[in-house]
Image: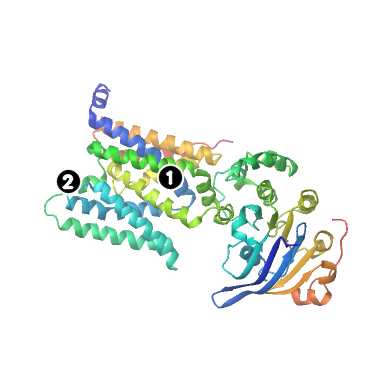
Amino acid sequence: MEPLLDVKNLSVKFGDVSVLENVNFSLDKGDILTIIGPNGAGKTVLIKSILGLVEHKGEVNFLGDSIMKRIDEIGYVPQRLDFDRTFPITAKELMDLVLKKSDIKNMEIVCNHLEIDKLLSKKIGTLSGGQLQRVLIARAVAGSPKLLIMDEPTAGVDIGGVRSFYDIVGHLNKEHGITIILISHEINMVYSLASKVLCLNKKMICVGNPKEAISRNILDKLYGGSVEPREHTHL
Amino acid sequence: MENIINLISYPFVLRAIFAGIVTAALLAFLGVFVVLRKMSFYSDGIAHASLAGVAAGILLSSQPLLWAMIVGVIFAILVFWLEKKTTVSVDAIIGVLFTASLALGVVLINLKSGYQPDLISFLFGNILTIQYSDIWLILIVALITGIFMIVKYKQYLLLSLNKDLAYLSGINLSLYELLFYIALSVSVILGIKIVGVVLVSALVIVPVSSAKLFSSSAKSLAIWSVILSEISMLLGIFLSLAFNLPTGATIVLTEAFIFFVLVLAPAKS
């Protein structure tokens, strides 16, 4: 079966500095891939390269096509939305921007499910990190993407918010069949949620099923012995 | 008051009011994206750069506004190209281009001997000298630019908010950037006959800045920017006629007055 996403020999250089070297992995429909690695490992660069936001070498194919041809089938939630917080735009307006008419009905269902109905009339500059994150997820999901990519979606979200976020991720994957890539620092979550893990520290250190791919040795290579793997099952 | 009512019946005053209304709406609407993208210096730069076109028009005894637009389009393309081609920041590129174009204008105008009343009216604006040919030019350019920006409103709003999201929504960033630069250039130049090269960027920046003080959404920002711009334009024209003041400067002072009133107004709880 053709993979949903196929990344081959992906490398990125900023000037003479190598940021990513020969990353290879593929995803099947319904996978949840978690990318882990220390700060500066190139996780965000990898995601942005896949999306075509960063110049790179190598191939990225989505359903057999160049990813740019099917970019509207991908939802993206950035780590931090870089915008002017005084920009007077409401969450509803942000949701509406360039959404196809067919997505509007979808949007109402998504907003209801993510419990952001009450936030829609507020300016996005006044929302908390977690609230804005949910609006961005709703926006990304309203377009019925086949692949949803999220860059550290729980950064700046409180503990309750993190738990409800992972519930949402599980729901989107299981009930709607959306394939998901997410960057996370929460290694313990990887075991309970992800079907695949990619360990990155400029080079690809591991890829595969979390229980098989993550070992003490791999974590030492990634984090230098400061992290203990613990399998959580309650998430 | 009776005198003002009488004045309105004069064709040159009617032309002034018509040109003012159309330009005020167009520049305020474009100003929404200029202010949100922090591009105020671009509108100032384009206005000054257009002086080379004005000078060429005067020298060739051709329509200066049309020549200024040609210079404006060249300016837009050059800014866009240099931004992609070099590592120089965009404000520095604008600085280089507008001073060079301004200097070229000074050299060109120096080739024509004698006092140049036309030049003074383009520098400080004289809405009352607007001809029917200017009206047609303003109307055609405003219609094309205005309709384009209204149709592409959502795309430009997203582009102003975040380039990555815009790109991932399938927006061709380079094409949209270039078209915006050109649309802004020709629109700003429409305003130089009204308020002059020196003051025209106020029509782009001030009404939006005023509306931004109290707007609760992007839609209300766009609507209030246009409303405040029209109020300032009409009030400015009538005040200048009533007190025999320079029209362009009076319009800009009216805009600035409204801005400060809104700044000092008690905030809504």
Q: Is residue B137 above or below residue A40?
A: above
**Residue closest to the eye, B168 or A18:** B168
What coloring was used for the rendering? rainbow
Q: Position of residue A182 (x, y in %)?
A: 72, 60
Q: Which residue is mark 1?
A: B30
Quarter that holds the C terminus of chain A: bottom right
State the residue lying farthest toward the front: A1
Which label sits in the foreground, 2 or 1? Answer: 1
**Residue closest to the eye, A75 or B8:** A75
Q: Is residue B84 above or below residue A141?
A: below
* Numbered mark located on residue B117 in the image: 2
* Numbered mark located on residue B258 in the image: none
Please name the residue shown 75% across and 42% down the image. Answer: A113
The amino acid on which the numbered mark 2 sits, given as a three-letter code, is Pro
**The residue marked by circle 1 belongs to what chain?**
B
Picture quadrant where residue A201 is located: bottom right
The amino acid on which the numbered mark 1 sits, given as a three-letter code, is Leu
Q: Residues within 10 Å of mark 1 (few under 14, many from 20)?
A: many
Quarter that holds the N terminus of chain A: bottom right
Please name the residue shown 40% across and 45% down the image. Answer: B204
Please name the residue shown 69% across and 65% down the image. Answer: A6
Left or right: B93 with respect to B71? right
State the residue lying farthest toward the left: B114
Left or right: A216 with respect to B266? right
Left or right: A214 with respect to B226? right
**The residue marked by circle 2 belongs to what chain?**
B
* Mark before the other along the chain sequence, 2 or 1: 1
